[in-house]
Image: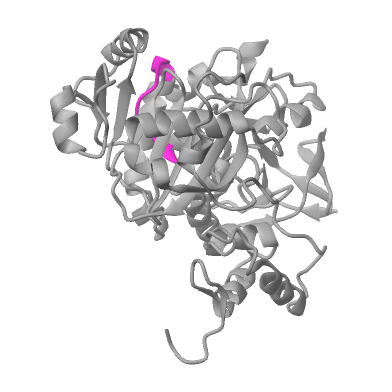
Amino acid sequence: MGKGKKIVCFCHDVTEEDIVEAIKMGYDDIESIKRFTGATTGPCQGKSCMMHILRILRRMGKLKEAKTTVIRPPIDPVPMEALLGDEGEED
Amino acid sequence: MKKTDIAVVGCGALGAGIAYNIAKLGRKPLVFEAKYFGYGSTGRDIGVVRGRHRDPDVAKLASEGLKLHEKLPDELGSNTLFRQDGVLTVALTSEEAEALEKEFKSYASGSFIELSRDEVRSRYPYLRVDDVKLCYLSSREGLVHPLAVLWGYLDAVRRLGGEVVKPAEVISIEPKGDKLNIKTALGEYEASKVVVAAGFRSRELLSKLGIDIPLEPLAKEALVTEPMKPFLDPVIERPGTGLVVAQTMRGEVIGTVGSLGKTSDLTLSSYRFLRDFARQATQLIPAVRSLKVLRQWTWVVDTTPDGKPVIGETSVNRVYVACGMHDYGLSLVPVVSKLIGRLVVEGVEDPMLKPFSPSRFG
């Protein structure tokens, strides 16, 4: 990691430079940035990086509405074995 | 009113692929995207590329699609992250085995091999084979990054002088003389030809032109886990329950099972899906037990009554359609976009497209 790099997404090592580059390439809304750079898709699911990205979008005049990506379950990561349920449980 | 040459409605992998093939033949495509790139299906798809299909007409396309997927990174000059580690198709009950055997009998010999339980165990030691009744390996198939396909096409479209606008929902298309008037959220456009590749939303748009295509949305759920060291080479699928499990190049385990039925509601999420996936995935791959699920989502595919896609010129001159791709769309994108590009630009209809004509719905 070089000097002066600003990390936006710690889960996937996405820098501010990466975000700016994506915006310049036309991936200039929060949902497109998410998919193109991988930011917000790690274990934190955007909890630590979303606001940074929104700030960069606003600074570049691309923030049309103050909106995060769609929040999906689970709120926090859940191990697969906790989802097995009880054997005879009803649907 | 802005004037344009050929318009494409919908910027999923298919719309972007169609625009690329139009641009490659020397024309200037303009793509309209209502939301963001890959909103409905492409961005939610798991990315399994198969070269086979139960329907022989679709199978021809799929086989060609697989070949083109192999060449796509070179053609586009961009990595689609296509990994041909094979697709392992398993049956866990005798009913499933019977159906699977019948299905694979119709496939070209040489495109797959049958593996015994011992062979599965020695090739893939992380698989629990106790319940496996029948297993086929289609070794040239595999996993692609659906959005990387879309981005690759988009990049090439822009390089070739095409244009993409978003968010620009297309509200209506109306014939006007020998041109087409396109009303969008960004204003009106005039085009010489229009290709509709808007997934399940194609139906509503085309019905305003008096074209009825009996598309029904089908919602499927998917999930992704935290990444772990790459261990799962092939895609594992169990057609009996709709289970698909794979590991992405980033190490995340990704998968689906079952469906939510005929709805186009992209905001749904069910516990039942998580439970069914957890049970079925851990039954086959015990190592995923302790993996944490990061996210689940819903993805909508567009289906037709006869199971075949809808590809070709509609009853309205110069209006073309490519939709009804079910859950195998991504496998077909390279071939369908290539053939429809030739149809739109050169007027040449490939015989492979005949069974998919929109006129078959009367």
How does the figure colour the protein chain or chains? one colour
Residue drawn at 48 percent across, 56 percent down:
B152
Q: Nearer the viewer, residue B150 or B19?
A: B150
Majority SS type along the magenta span: loop
**Rendering coords of residue B21 (x, y %):** 50, 46
Drawn side of residue B317 relative to residue B245, left or right: right
To which quarter of the image does residue B305 belong? top right
Relative height, residue B145 to residue B156 (above, below): above
Please state which of residues B12 and B232 is positioned toward the viewer in this rendering.
Answer: B232
Residue B216 percent coordinates (x, y): 67, 21
In which quarter of the view is residue B125 placed?
Answer: top left
Q: Residue furthest bottom?
A: A3
Question: Where residue B259 appears, x then y in whole percent?
Answer: 58, 25
Residue located 61% across and 47% down the image: B38
Q: Which residues are magenta?
A: B45-57
Which of the 4 image quarters holds residue B141? top left
Q: Where A49 falls versus B303 (above or below)?
A: below
Give coordinates of residue B302: x percent, y percent.
62, 27
Quadrant of the snapshot with the C terminus of chain B: top right
